[in-house]
Structures are given as C-alpha cells and as structure tokens.
Image (cartoon, rainbow, N blue to C red):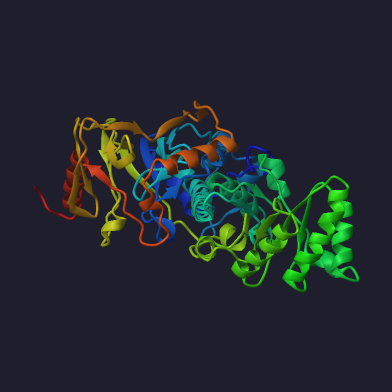
Amino acid sequence: MFENGIYRSSLALLTDMYQLTMAFGYWRLGIHDRLASFNLFFRRPPFAGGYTIAAGLEDALTFLEKLRFNDDDLAYLESLRGADGNALFNGDFIRFLQQFKFDCDVHAVPEGTVVFPHEPILRVTGPVLACQLVETALLNIVNYQTLVATKAARVCYSAQGDSVVEFGLRRAHGIDGGLSASRAAFIGGCSATSNLLAGKTYGIPVSGTHAHSWVMCFENELDAFTEYANTMPGNCVLLVDTYDSLRGVKHAIEVGKKLELQGKQLLGIRLDSGDLAYLSIEARRLLDEAGFTNTQIIASNDLDEVIIDSLKRQGAKINIWGVGTKLVTSYDQPALGGVYKLSLIQNERGQWLPKLKLSEQAVKISTPGLLQVRRFSDDKGAVADMIFDELTPPPAGATIIDPLDPTRRRRLTEDLKSEDLLQKVMESGQRVANTMSLHQIQVNTKNQLENFHDGIKRLVHPHRYPVGLEQNLYEAKTRLILKQRGFSE
C-alpha cells in the first residue's frame, strides 16, 4: 500500500499514545540520541503449526523511509491535553518532531523466510527515541502479513500443488486488510486473487467467475450460462450450484459444446456448496464423458487447510481452490502476537548494556544482546537455528540451548553449512538492500519450505524444529535474570 501511493498523507501518527509520551520523556531527559537495539519477534507459532513465513518487510521499510510529522500531525499533538488540562507536549518538543527523521539501521530476514519463535524477524538499532516511535507501526504491518502468509502456505501445502486463489476481499477487515491479505497470501503461495486493486497495486494475477445473481437474473440457468459464454467466450468459467449442482454441470457442458464450435473452450466450472468431494467426483465424470477432460473444477465455500486436506483424502477431483474468509481473516487465530523488545542500550559513557524483560512466565522473558540468527544445514536441508549476540560471536562447533528447557541442547558441528538470516536493509534510515519483487518473494517462500523436513509442515502435531540460544548468550541471559531477581553470583 505504501510504495504505491494509496496512503498519500503522513502516517507518523500510526502509533500508540504511549510511544509519544515515552519519546517526550527521552527528549526531556536528553537521552533521545542514546543508541539502542530493539527486536521484533513472536513467542509461539501461529495455528499450532511448525513454522512461520515472514512477510510485510517491504511495506515496513517504505513506511520508515517516509516517516515525517507534517503540520497537521503537529497541530493535533499540540492540541492534546492531560488530565490536569495542560498541554501534554511542550512547544520545544513539537519543534523537535518537526525536524524528526528516522535515522536507524534496520536488519531483517528477507520476506518469505521460514522463521521460528524467539528469532528476531527484524532488528532496529539507532537513537532510542527513533527506535521507540516505530514499534507500533512495525508490529501492525509485520504481524498481520506474517500471519496471513503463514496461513496461505499451510493452505497451499494441503492443496498438494493445485492452484489456490485468494477470494477474501469481501470478508477482509477493511480496505487495508483486504490489500495486505492479498499481498501476504501471494507470498504464502496463492497463484491469484479476486481483488482487482491488489492486482493493480502489486501485479498479482487476478481471477474470477460470476455470482449466483447472474444466474438468477435469467429465466433459466441454461440461458444464463449461454449469455455469460457470449460475454466471456475466451474466459468462461461457470458457477453451477445456484439450483442443482450436477444439473448445472450438464448445462455447462451444453454451453461448452457451443463454445467449441467457436474455437473456444469451457475453462472451468465452480462448485460453491454441498458435498464438494462427491460433487467434484461426479462433475469430473460428467465432464470427461462429454470430452471436456481439460475443463477444470474450482471449489470454494469456507475452505481452509484442514477442509482441503480432508477433501484430498476423500478423492475430490478439484483442480483449483478458492479460499477466502478463513484465509484473509486468519479465522482460527486472528493475531500473531509478535512483540518488539529492547535488548541493548548504551549508557552515558557509550558502553553497551544488555537488557531483558522479566516475567513469571519463562516464554515471556526476552533475550539481551545485539541479536542475530544463524541457520545451519546439511545436504538434506536445515537442521537447526542459533540465536546469538553479535557482540560476542559464537565459537566454531557451538552448542545451542533451548531457552525454555536448558536440558535440551545440541552441538552444531563444524561440518555444517550456515548463513545469518538478518540482513542489513537500512543504514541511517536509507535503504541499502535490493528490493525483491513480489514474485521473487513467492519463489523464496517455496524454496525456503523445500529446505525443511515435511515433519514441520504437518497440520497436526508438527515436528519441533531445533532453535536455541548460543551457549554464551544463554549463560549471559541467565546471569542477567539472576541479577534482576536480586541474586548475586
């Protein structure tokens, strides 16, 4: 949305109130330029799955590039009052914001990368005020697109190579939700969308048939099909379930024969209700017997990865899956739960101080340091990921420790290949990495998933891919936890 100019006005106020109150505090204390590092990550994989697909980076970077407070933004902030009736922000701070420009370094995993809990998807390092101000917007952009891209990848995995078309605009959460969902669904593997604005904006192939209302506008179904074929002779797909699905297939076959006389083809039929396994099998039989072996069967009707998997097991003869509501709304898990946590800040002498958030729940204790993720692989694919502190590089043959279970450890032998996932994409607020096209991102998703064992892609009780803290980082984190809890060594 951002790079194509759909949002033309300032989005500097796309944030929560507390980001501005903290920014005012940093500025008032004179520590706003103190360097810090924040990490965006999630704690649990969505859908009780075994992996997650990172998405949303391109929109996030464009937002950061364009981040400015315009006169209207500043006038609004100047108008805000506290409970005591006084201005929340003084004039000097407003003038400071007038000159504000995002000037941080950003490291991120490329879109389409397979990622796991506790791994930074994105790392922002720079003046603490600037790092803080962008928290809400980054979470808003990355959380949702990552969620939908992951859902789409699961749906496409269930479809076993069949085309999946995203049909969800009418059920999406608003205009932005519809556009972001179409983009993320394409990243996850969908081949097309029904959303024309997304097609125009992102270059995603578009697809669509007709609605039941077209059929209902005519005296009978055969007339409706005939006139639609006359309207779209080179792109004819007929929705056959308005009255009786199998009778509708027979009417479609009649129209298909007329198309053949014109040198055209009946491209497909769509089923949108009923027993899709039975109806698709019978429809395939009728089409094949009539010689329409190339006519495809499209199915829709509140589909998701679980239903598609079940239909596949039942032998459904469906070639294309139209998935809408349950994809774009992420029906069974409406939020990813990504967070953005401070992990490092400089003191007044310029020394880096590691920081973590404590919690009674181990899963919510953050990790300190300038964090990076290193993925190790052998000839069969990825074998484990290591989270480490770039300020204390790991030794060769390092050991990783599960952050939630210190008894789960793994030594990563020196013969393994490795790559660091976080790449510098911004330096001092300017892009320094080449932008991938959306089609390239989709290919990256496919290649990434092929690098992992099928066990992590299972829909139910997937394999748990090994991710751990490098041993030195784990021990440093433990010492800091003990210190914060009042225990000295």
What residue occupies the far left of the structure in this picture?
Answer: 489
| Image height of 161 relative to 419, above or below | below
Looking at the figure, which quarter contains the N terminus?
top right
Q: Is residue 468 left or right of residue 113?
A: left
Q: Specify whether 255 is left or right of 162.
A: right
Query: Which of these two is toward me, 93 or 380?
Result: 380
Q: Relative to the observer, which residue lies in front, 34 or 329?
A: 329
In the image: residue 352, left or right of residue 457: left
Question: Which residue lies at the image location 39% right of the left edge and 62% below the top edge?
Answer: 460
Seen at 52% across and 28% down, the residue is 431
Q: Residue at x 73, y 70 (%)?
A: 245
**Residue at 36%, 47% in the rendered image:** 453
Q: Position of residue 120 (x, y in %)?
A: 38, 43
388 or 350: which is nearer to us?
A: 388
Total marks drawn?
A: 0
Q: Nearer the viewer, residue 231 or 62?
A: 231
The percent coordinates of residue 394 (x first, y second) are: 22, 33
Q: Is residue 206 above or below residue 317?
A: above
Would you say residue 371 is visible in this rendering?
no
Task: State whether residue 441 appears in this view.
Answer: yes
